[in-house]
Image: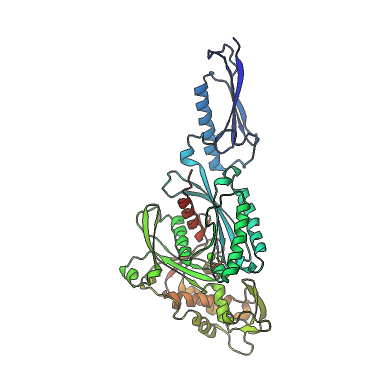
Amino acid sequence: MECSLVSQYFLSPADRWMVSHKFLVSPDGGSCSESLSSVELWAETATLSYKMDYEPSFLRTLFSLILVSSLLDCVLSEVDAFPDTKTWFENLLPSTMCIQNASIESVYGIMFDAGSTGTRIHIYSFTQKYPDQLPELRKEIFESVKPGLSAYADIPEQGAETIRGLLEVAKDAVPSSHWKKTPVVLKATAGLRLLPEKKAQALLSEVKNVLEESPFLVPDNSVSIMNGTYEGILAWITVNFLTGQLYSQSKQTVGILDLGGASTQITFLPQSEETLEQSPLDFITSFKMFHTTYKLYTHSYLGLGLKAARLATLGAVETGAVDKQIFRSSCLPKNLEAVWEFGGVSYRYGGIENGESGFKSCYAEVLRIVAGKLHQVDEIKGSTFYAFSYYYDRAADTNLIDYGKGGILEVRDFERKAIEVCDHMEGFTSSSPFLCMDLSYITALLKEGFGFKINTPLQLTKKVNNVETSWSLGATFLMLQSLRISN
Ligand SMILES: O=c1[nH]cnc2c1ncn2[C@@H]1O[C@H](COP(=O)(O)OP(=O)(O)O)[C@@H](O)[C@H]1O
Ligand SMILES: [Ca+2]
């Protein structure tokens, strides 16, 4: 009776390993007297290779092969020691053999934040132990480009090219074996909200084409302009997830303040019945996430972002950019004349030569932008808010906080710094000429707009555990939940 040599190959779950299994079989099912049998395990990077002899019992061997390759995969996916590589045997065997597959395989999500001042890509990787629970975030890869999509209003194809460039980052970050099941979504905020409908739609349609050419999963409605209410809620989810509040039952959540280029958001979980009763209906939103219902106070004020506020202060919102016109403000250095670009439009602007300048007159100018425009809530006066985006950037620019670490400030710290900068404007010429206007606007927005007290603490935060505090993480959670993407 002749025994013949049989080789079998197994691909490990994340395609990092190939296991070759060689054994002898007899045609009548009897046992072979010779003992030719071996198991080889290869890391795709060929850094590891070994053989072991075993009793030629097919089932036992198969089981141990799967177990070993699964464990190695899972261990290596934790340390990320091996880059993704493609092999000739890819897809030869199903990649679901890992017995640990149900518990710790990675899930990826790609979210584009098309903001008014720039476009950012966030690539998140998660592990999710049980389908209906919060996934565990492993890491984020972040990249951004400037200007934002709205600057390409008249050349949408070029705008979409910026997305193509950022998608290359995603291709490097997500293993190719996961491309087809990794969703990619783009949400635009206030920059596109402010564009004429036709121009915004042309941009979105070009972007959609680019996403569809990518190897990633493109869900329905993958490219859209996000409603301002969502922007606040999703940023609130991000911050409370990153600070651990969503895991705890205590409902000790934190409120958030986001100051973008074109719009600004405030979001918090009301503790008082009065807030729920006295707020306009569209300021209160209920939503359910991972078995808990939250009733949040949130509102996005379009046109009250930092850069939109500059335009309003300069009086350039209605007029638009008129070629020869110079927009002037007492918030700018007296002798300044320069050009500023926002949303693809160039504005000439400058100080008031031989006229007023300094904090007092500047504050009066910016106050007009917020006066009577915002809903105020008593409850927020005594609570701490997380503040990011331009609150953070301007605080860091003026050394109120450390750029890397952030810190806690009070509302009056912004006011003090505004006075210091505005009353010595000539001394600050090297940094942004808008520094006095921006700090004065932030002070007016917090004090007179939202109605915070001067000693209300603000936690200035850019990253928590190395993850950006932005709405995009919250949006990715909901995307994965709605697509039911888990392993
Ligand atoms: O992911 C992020 N991490 C940190 N800061 C961000 C991120 N995304 C946006 N920002 C900040 O948001 C501000 C710009 O606002 P944006 O361009 O998003 O305008 P918009 O929200 O009005 O559309 C800047 O201060 C920028 O640093
Ligand atoms: Ca934003």
Q: Residue at x 44, y 62 (%)?
A: 233
Q: Residue at x 41, y 62 (%)?
A: 254
Residue 118 visible from this viewpoint: no
Q: Residue at x 34, y 56 (%)?
A: 250
Outermost residue on the left side: it is 273
Q: Horizontal and vertical percent for residue 101?
A: 49, 38
Q: Is residue 160 left or right of residue 226?
A: right
Quadrant, the N terminus = top right
Q: Quadrant of residue 315?
A: bottom right
Q: Horizontal and vertical percent for residue 12?
A: 56, 34
Q: Horizontal and vertical percent for residue 466?
A: 53, 55
Q: Horizontal and vertical percent for residue 360?
A: 52, 85
Is 224 drawn above or below residue 449 in the view shown? above
Q: Say which of 315 and 25 sits in front.
A: 25
Is 10 drawn above or below residue 462 in the view shown? above
Picture quadrant of ligand 1: bottom right
Is 162 drawn above or below residue 31 in the view shown? below
Q: Say which of 18 and 257 sits in front.
A: 18
Q: Quadrant of residue 116?
A: bottom right
Q: Quadrant of residue 193?
A: bottom right
Outermost residue on the front side: it is 198
Outermost residue on the top side: it is 1
Residue 112 visible from this viewpoint: yes
Q: Is residue 354 left or right of residue 250?
A: right
